[in-house]
C-alpha cells in the first residue's frame, strides 16, 4: 500500500515500456463535445420521424374512467393517439422483482396506465405528431375523465390497517422487508457507557441529468428490426428488455448509445414512457422520438433516498463501539422499478451500515413500502450516502457524548489495515481495505490540528465553523451476486474486441459505455499499454449492441475495473497474435519479440524490428508471403467477470470544513477533502474528477436537493428554479488523495471510483454542521437537506 | 392552438439565414430544429440551467428565453461558430486537458459564458469571480472545480500573452 498525491501518476507492476496505466491522459472523445459536435439522442433526427408527447395523470391516484381522443385525432398534424389497450397489442407488461431479494413483490406495470393512474405524472395516453410542439398541442385536446382515489403518501402509515392498499392483488403495501440480527446487540447496548439515539431523514431527490431522458425508436417493418437510439447506461440490458416485451428475438433489436448527457444511475432503468415510445414505433412502423421535458423529468425520472432511519449506537468510555442498530423505512412509489427493483437501496443500507468498523453487534430492520408518488430506484451510490451518514452521524454524536475527538474514536474502531481478508458484521467480504492509512492521510492533508485551532480562535469572535468526517466503504465491480443471481438479465461480465487495422492502428469495441466518466479513455489506456501502441493509435467504439461485445455497461462503479480488465486482456492477447505474425515475417522466435510504441522490437535490446503498419500491410495484402499454413489472427475478444469476490469493496474518508451563519442559517462550504482507495489508479485525473463530481452531488443532497410533495401526492417543485442543485459559486474546492490497495482478482487491480464522492459527502457535511453548532447547544441536525430554516430552528431562532 | 409564422432574416455564425418560423418558437429550438445546429442544448427550458447559452449581438443569451422571431436582424453565434472561428480554441483545449467536462452537455453553454467573462475582465479573475460568473450554467458531472481550474488557466495565459 502506498499513498498517492493528488493527480500524481503512480508506478505499478503494470508498467510496460509505454504504459499509460497511472497517467492522466486526456479523454479521446472530448473535442467533439467541446465543439458542440456530439451526438446525443436529443440530436437524433431520422427520415419519417414522428414525435410523441404523453398525457399524464394530474392525480397521485385515480381511476381512469374514460379517455376521449376524437378531438385530438382530428387535429391536422396528429399521426396517432394511442391508449393502453392498443399498446397492449404490441408490448407486454413487466414486474420489478428479483428472486434473491426474498419476498420482494410488485404489481405489473404497463407502458401506459391501465384503468388506474398510480402517481402524478404517470403517462395515460400517447399523442404522436409531426413535431413535439404539435403533439403537446394535441395532448390538450385529449379529455381524460378521472375518479380520484385516496393517495397513500406517508410511508409511516402505508402499512396501517386503515390505509388503502394500492395494489389489491398484493394484499398490502409492503414491497420488501429485511431483518438482520448479528452478535448480541441488546447485551452490548446494556453494557455500553453511552448510548446515542437519533432519527435520520433523507429527502427524496433525483439525478437532474442536464440532458433529459431521450429515446428514438425505429421499427423497420422490412427488416423486422427495431433500432433504438437510447440515452442509457446499459444497452445490452435494454436490448433484452425491448425484445422480451415486444415479443421478438434479441437479435432483432439494436440499441445505439452515443453521447449521453448525464446518467448517475437515472438512465439504467425501464421507464414506461420509453417502453411506450418503442411500442409506438412498432405499431406505427416509423421512427418515434421521445425526449422528456424538465417537468416530465422531475415527475418520472426515478427518485431516490427518502429514508427515515431510527438509529442507535452504544459506546464504552474508551471509545469502543459496541453495537449499531437501525430501523429503516422507505417509500418507493407504486411500483418496484424494473428490472433492478426498488428494494436494492434499503438492502444496501442494511449491508453497509457500520461497515468500516470492527463492531460485531448489529441489528437492522428495513421496510420498503408502496405509495402514490413517483417511483424510486437506484441513483448514484445507492444506499451508501444513507448508510454512511447514519453510521458516521452516530459515530460523531457518540464521540461528542463521551468527549473524544471524532478521528480518535474512528482510529479505535476502524477495521485494522492488517486484518484482511475479513468481513463485516453484516457479512460483507473485504479483500483489502485501508481505513487507517486513509484517515492518517486525510488528517495530514487537511491539517486537522491547524483547522481545530482556527475553529477555536474564530468561535471567540462568534464565527461558527465546523469540521466533519465520514469514513466509508463502497461497493464496486459487482459480480453476478448483484443482479444475475436474482434472475435479472443484467450481465456482470464485460468484453472487449481489439483489432489491428490495415495501417497498424488499434480499434477497440467495448461493452462498457460512456456518459462522461471517461470509460473510453480508460479502455484506450489499457489496450495501448498491454498491446504496446501510442494511445493516439487507439480508437474506442462503445454503445452499439450490433457491434460491441456483450456487456453490462457503466453503473455500480464497474467500467474501469471490469471493462478495463477485459480491454487489458484483449490487448495482451492481440499482442501475442501480432508478435506471432512478426515472428513469421522476421523468422524470429515470438518469445524474443515485443511490441513497444507501435513497433515490433527485440525484447532484450529494444532494437526496432518491424513497424506495425508494415506488419499489417503484409498480413492483410501479402499473406501469400507468409509461411504455408500460417494464418494471421488480427482481431481478438476477451471478457472479464469478477469471480473471487462478490464485490470489490473500496474505502475512504471525507472531511468537510464549513461555516454556519447563525443569523441566516446559511452554510458556506470552505473546503472539502476526500482520500479514497480504488486500488490501481488507471487515470489519476479521471479518478479525481469522479470523486469531485460525486462529492458535489452528495453536497446537493445534504444542503439543497429535495423533491417536495404535498399530502395529496403532488410534487411542488418540479422545475429547476424551485428544485435546487449545486451551483458553482456555492461549491468549495475539493482536494483528493489516494491510498492504493489493488484487488488481486484482476491483473489490473483496479476497483471503482464513481460513487465514493457521493457516498461520503452528505455525512461529512452533516457532521461539520453539527460540529459548528455544538457550542451553541443546538439540537443535532439529522434531517437532510439542511436548509437555512432547519438550521435556524435547531438554533431556536425561529 | 393558434400560431402564426413570420419571416425572419438574421446572421448565424456569419452566415445569412432567411426562414419562416412559428412565432412561438424559441431561439434554441429554431437553431436545433430548423438550422440543425445541435451544439446548443436544451436543459430546463426556463432560463435556469444555461445549457442553451448562445451569443446574440455579442451578449450571452438564454436560447430558451428568447423567441426566434425576436432575432430578426440579429447576429447569433453558437458553439459551432465559436469553434470554427477559433475564438474559444484555448478554452476548449484547457477544458479537454483539465477534464473540465464529463458528459459534455453543459459544455457549449459553459464555454460561451466563460468566454464572456474573459472578454469582460482585463485582469485575471479570482476563482470566486469565475465561480460567480458561471453560476448560471449548471453542471451535474464535474462539481465545477475542474471548470474553474480551466477558466483560470486560460485567463492567466491570455493575461500573460497581453504583457
Image (cartoon, grey):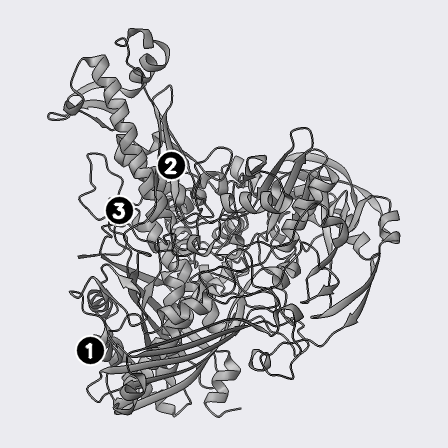
The residue at the point 25 percent across, 9 percent down is: A627
Q: Is residue A189 left or right of residue A132?
A: left
**Label 2 secondary element:** strand
Closer to viewer: mark 2 or mark 1: 2
The answer to whether marks 2 and 1 sit on the same chain is yes
Disc 3 designates what residue?
A: A746
**Residue at far left of view:** A604
Disc 2 designates what residue?
A: A496
Alpha-carbon distance for marks 2 and 1?
A: 44 Å
Circle nearer the N terminus (1, 3): 1
**Label 1 secondary element:** helix
Image quarter (top left, top right, bottom left or bottom right) of the N terminus of chain A: bottom left
The residue at the point 48 percent across, 61 percent down is: A379
Residue A38 to residue A723: above or below:
above
Circle nearer the N terminus (2, 1): 1
Return the chain for callout 1. Answer: A
Circle nearer the N terminus (2, 3): 2
Q: Quadrant of residue A282?
A: top right
Crowd class of label 3 (few under 14; some 14 to 19; many from 20; radius 10 Å): many
- Front one among B14 and A175: A175
Return the chain for callout 2. Answer: A
**Label 3 secondary element:** loop
Labelled disc at residue A412: 1
The residue at the point 46 percent across, 49 percent down is: A490
Q: Position of residue A566 (x, y in %)?
A: 33, 40
Crowd class of label 1 (few under 14; some 14 to 19; many from 20; radius 10 Å): some
Crowd class of label 2 (few under 14; some 14 to 19; many from 20; radius 10 Å): many
Closer to viewer: mark 1 or mark 3: 3
Residue A731 to residue A137: above or below:
below
Q: Quadrant of residue A357?
A: bottom left
Amino acid at each position: 500500500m502506498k499513498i498517492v498525491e493528488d493527480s500524481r501518476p503512480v508506478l505499478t507492476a503494470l508498467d510496460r515500456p509505454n504504459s499509460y496505466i497511472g497517467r492522466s491522459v486526456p479523454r479521446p472523445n472530448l473535442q467533439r463535445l467541446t465543439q458542440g459536435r456530439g451526438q446525443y439522442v436529443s440530436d437524433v433526427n431520422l427520415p419519417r420521424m414522428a414525435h410523441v408527447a404523453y398525457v399524464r395523470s394530474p392525480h397521485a391516484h385515480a381511476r381512469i374512467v374514460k379517455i376521449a381522443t376524437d378531438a385530438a385525432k382530428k387535429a391536422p398534424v396528429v399521426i396517432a393517439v394511442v391508449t393502453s389497450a392498443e399498446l397492449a397489442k404490441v408490448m407486454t407488461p413487466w414486474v420489478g422483482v428479483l428472486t434473491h431479494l426474498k419476498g420482494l413483490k410488485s404489481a405489473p406495470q404497463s407502458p401506459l396506465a391501465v384503468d388506474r393512474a398510480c402517481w402524478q405524472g404517470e403517462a395515460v395516453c400517447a399523442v404522436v405528431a409531426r413535431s413535439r410542439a404539435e403533439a403537446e398541442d394535441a395532448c390538450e385536446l385529449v379529455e381524460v375523465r378521472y375518479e380520484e382515489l385516496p393517495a397513500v403518501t406517508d410511508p409511516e402509515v402505508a402499512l396501517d390497517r386503515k390505509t388503502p392498499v394500492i395494489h389489491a392483488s398484493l394484499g398490502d403495501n409492503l414491497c420488501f422487508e429485511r431483518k438482520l440480527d448479528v452478535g448480541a446487540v441488546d447485551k452490548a447496548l446494556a453494557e455500553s457507557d453511552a448510548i446515542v439515539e437519533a432519527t435520520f431523514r433523507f429527502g427524496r431527490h433525483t439525478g437532474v441529468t442536464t440532458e433529459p431522458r431521450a429515446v428514438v425508436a425505429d421499427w423497420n417493418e422490412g427488416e423486422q428490426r427495431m433500432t433504438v437510439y437510447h440515452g442509457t447506461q446499459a444497452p445490452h440490458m435494454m436490448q433484452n428488455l425491448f425484445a422480451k416485451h415486444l415479443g421478438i428475438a434479441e437479435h432483432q433489436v439494436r440499441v445505439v448509445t452515443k453521447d449521453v448527457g448525464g446518467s448517475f444511475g437515472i438512465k439504467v432503468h425501464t421507464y414506461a414512457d420509453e417502453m411506450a415510445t418503442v411500442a409506438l414505433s412498432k405499431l406505427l412502423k416509423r421512427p418515434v422520438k421521445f425526449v422528456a421535458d424538465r417537468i416530465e423529468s422531475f415527475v418520472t425520472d426515478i427518485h431516490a433516498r427518502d429514508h427515515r432511519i431510527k438509529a442507535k449506537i452504544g459506546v464504552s468510555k474508551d471509545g469502543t463501539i459496541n453495537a449499531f442498530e437501525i430501523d429503516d423505512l422507505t417509500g418507493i412509489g407504486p411500483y418496484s422499478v424494473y428490472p433492478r427493483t426498488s428494494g436494492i437501496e434499503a438492502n444496501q443500507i442494511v449491508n453497509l451500515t457500520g461497515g468500516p468498523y470492527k463492531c460485531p453487534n448489529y441489528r437492522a430492520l428495513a421496510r420498503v413500502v408502496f405509495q402514490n408518488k413517483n417511483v424510486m430506484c437506484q441513483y448514484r451510490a445507492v444506499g451508501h450516502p444513507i448508510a454512511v451518514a447514519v453510521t458516521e452521524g452516530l459515530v460523531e454524536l457518540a464521540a461528542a457524548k463521551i468527549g473524544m475527538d471524532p478521528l480518535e474514536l474512528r482510529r479505535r474502531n476502524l477495521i485494522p489495515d492488517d486484518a484482511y481478508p475479513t468481513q463485516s458484521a453484516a457479512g460483507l467480504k473485504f479483500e483489502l481495505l485501508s481505513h487507517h492509512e486513509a484517515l492518517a492521510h486525510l488528517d495530514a492533508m487537511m491539517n486537522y490540528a491547524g483547522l481545530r485551532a482556527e475553529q477555536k480562535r474564530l468561535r471567540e469572535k462568534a464565527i461558527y465553523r465546523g469540521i466533519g468526517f465520514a469514513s466509508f466503504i463502497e461497493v464496486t465491480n459487482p459480480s453476478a451476486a448483484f443482479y444475475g443471481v436474482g434472475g435479472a438479465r443484467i450481465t456482470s461480465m464485460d468484453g472487449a474486441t481489439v483489432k489491428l487495422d490495415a495501417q497498424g492502428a488499434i480499434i477497440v469495441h467495448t461493452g462498457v459505455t460512456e456518459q462522461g466518466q471517461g470509460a473510453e479513455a480508460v479502455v484506450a489506456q489499457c489496450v495501448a499499454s498491454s498491446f504496446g501502441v501510442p494511445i493516439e493509435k487507439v480508437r474506442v467504439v462503445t454503445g452499439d449492441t450490433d457491434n460491441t461485445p456483450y456487456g453490462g455497461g457503466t453503473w455500480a462503479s464497474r467500467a474501469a475495473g471490469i471493462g478495463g480488465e477485459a480491454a487489458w486482456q484483449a490487448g495482451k492477447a492481440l499482442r501475442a497474435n501480432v508478435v506471432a505474425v512478426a515472428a513469421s515475417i522476421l523468422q524470429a522466435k515470438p518469445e524474443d519479440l515485443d511490441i513497444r510504441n507501435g513497433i515490433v522490437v527485440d525484447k532484450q535490446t529494444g532494437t526496432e524490428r518491424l513497424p506495425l503498419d508494415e506488419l499489417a500491410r503484409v498480413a492483410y495484402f501479402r499473406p501469400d508471403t507468409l509461411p504455408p499454413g500460417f494464418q494471421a489472427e488480427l482481431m481478438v475478444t476477451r471478457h472479464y467477470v469478477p469471480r473471487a469476490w462478490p464485490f470489490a469493496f473500496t474505502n475512504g474518508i471525507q472531511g468537510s470544513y464549513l461555516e454556519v451563519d447563525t443569523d441566516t442559517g446559511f452554510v458556506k462550504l470552505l473546503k472539502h477533502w476526500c482520500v479514497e482507495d480504488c486500488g490501481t489508479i488507471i487515470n489519476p485525473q479521471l479518478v479525481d474528477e469522479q470523486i469531485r463530481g460525486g462529492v458535489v452531488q452528495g453536497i446537493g443532497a445534504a444542503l439543497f436537493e429535495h423533491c417536495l410533495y404535498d399530502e395529496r401526492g403532488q410534487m411542488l417543485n418540479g422545475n429547476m428554479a424551485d428544485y435546487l442543485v449545486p451551483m458553482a459559486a456555492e461549491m468549495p474546492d475539493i482536494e483528493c488523495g489516494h491510498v492504493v490497495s489493488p484487488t488481486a482478482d484482476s491483473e489490473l487491480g483496479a476497483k471503482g471510483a464513481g460513487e465514493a464522492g457521493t457516498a461520503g459527502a452528505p455525512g461529512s457535511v452533516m457532521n461539520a454542521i453539527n460540529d459548528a453548532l455544538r457550542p451553541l447547544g443546538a439540537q443535532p441536525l439529522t434531517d437532510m437537506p439542511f436548509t437555512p430554516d432547519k438550521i435556524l430552528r435547531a438554533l431556536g431562532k425561529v | 392552438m393558434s400560431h402564426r409564422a413570420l419571416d425572419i432574416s438574421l446572421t448565424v455564425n456569419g452566415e445569412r439565414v432567411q426562414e419562416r418560423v412559428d412565432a412561438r418558437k424559441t431561439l434554441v429550438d429554431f437553431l436545433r430544429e430548423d438550422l440543425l445546429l445541435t451544439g446548443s442544448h436544451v436543459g430546463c427550458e426556463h432560463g435556469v440551467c444555461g445549457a442553451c447559452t448562445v451569443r446574440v449581438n455579442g451578449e450571452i443569451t438564454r436560447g430558451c428565453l428568447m423567441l426566434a422571431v425576436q432575432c430578426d436582424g440579429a447576429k447569433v453565434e453558437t458553439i459551432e461558430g465559436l469553434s470554427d472561428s477559433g475564438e474559444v480554441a484555448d478554452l476548449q483545449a484547457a477544458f479537454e486537458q483539465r477534464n473540465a467536462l464529463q458528459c459534455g452537455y453543459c459544455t457549449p453553454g459553459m464555454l460561451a459564458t466563460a468566454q464572456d467573462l474573459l472578454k469582460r475582465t482585463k485582469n485575471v479573475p479570482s476563482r470566486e469571480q469565475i465561480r460567480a460568473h458561471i453560476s448560471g450554467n449548471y453542471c451535474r458531472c464535474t462539481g465545477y472545480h475542474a471548470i474553474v481550474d480551466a477558466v483560470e488557466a486560460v485567463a492567466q495565459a491570455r493575461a500573460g500573452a497581453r504583457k
